[in-house]
Amino acid sequence: MDLYGYFRSSASYRVRIGLNLKGLSYDYHPVNLLKGDQHGEHYRKLNPHGLLPTLNDGDTSLTQSLAILEWLDETHPEPALLPKGAEARAYIRALAQSIASDIQPLQNLRVLKYLVSEFKITEEQKILWIQQWIHIGFAALEKQLKPTPFAVGDTPGLFECCLLPQVYNAERFGVDMNQYPKIQTIAATCNELSAFIEAHPQSQPDSTV
């Protein structure tokens, strides 16, 4: 498998965790978002949207992190990223999508660049913007989460693949995480596992931190 990503890309981070949880090896190809590599002709042929990540497996080329993670679960069923039972699976999908669809896109690099270039927001205003949407999303998630080691049961899965990158961003931008003890507990437990340690931005070959 070939994974095209960027060390700080939340969506790339999600897929790295998923691959690691599955015990799947892959070749990592850095795409530097700050230098605009995602807009180059070579990468646009792989992913016309110019977004990360892209996962190639032979003749199969996949985009969108949640679609990739569910494909991994269907093609490599064990260990499962989704629990058994329609209700439990819907619950986990909803939690994951609340991050991938509602929280993270509002702090995506292209959104932030647009706010700076078109509306001339300051660095302080940009940080406040990021913190605002994380707080709104995390406050709701904190109410939805159940008191288990992970979102469901005793093993991490799809939700944790999405949560850890968002916690990383929250800490990076100074969000007070003490308001979210359930989220903190899950994140701390995950960060002791090799699948998450090896997927962390600082562990990537293109890391600058």
Image: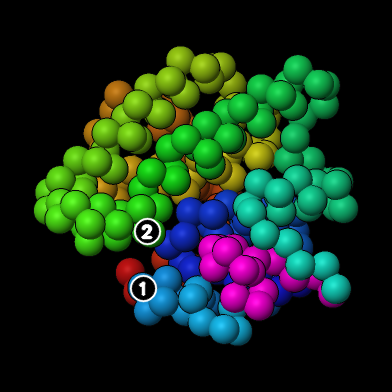
Residue at (84% x, 74% y) in the render: 58
Q: Say which mark, if any, is on residue 34.
A: 1
Q: Which of the 4 quarters of the picture holds residue 159?
A: top right
* Range drawn in magenta: 44-58
Q: Is residue 99 above or below residue 60?
A: above
x then y, percent, for residue 55: 70, 66
Dividing the picture into quadrants, the one containing residue 23 is bottom right
Circles 1 and 2: CB atoms closer than 8 Å: yes
Point out the image quarter for the N terminus: bottom right
Please tell me which residue is depicted at 73% across the width and 40% down the height of the picture: 81
Whether residue 51 is visible: yes
Q: Colour scheme used in the picture?
A: rainbow
Q: Is residue 129 magenta?
A: no
Q: Which sits earlier in the primary sequence, circle 1 or circle 2?
A: 1
Corner quadrant of residue 41: bottom right
Badge 1 marks a residue whose secondary structure is loop
Q: Position of residue 129 (x, y in %)?
A: 24, 41
Q: Amino acid at mark 1?
A: Leu
Residue drawn at x 79%, y 41% as measured from the top left: 80
**Residue, disc 2:** 109
Element type where label 2 sits in the image: helix
What is the crowding at mark 2: few (fewer than 14 residues within 10 Å), some, or many (at least 20)? Answer: some
Image height check: is 135 above or below 39? above
Task: Report the residue at 35% width, 26% height from top.
Answer: 136
Closer to the camera in the image, 182 or 100: 100
Give the amino acid at mark 2: Leu
In the orientation shown, which residue stands out farthest toward the front? 118
User: Is residue 13 shown left or right of residue 138?
Assistant: right
Inspect this view and state whether residue 20 appears: no
Q: Quadrant of the C terminus?
A: bottom left
> Is disc 1 surrounded by few (<14), some (14 to 19) or many (20+) residues within 10 Å?
few
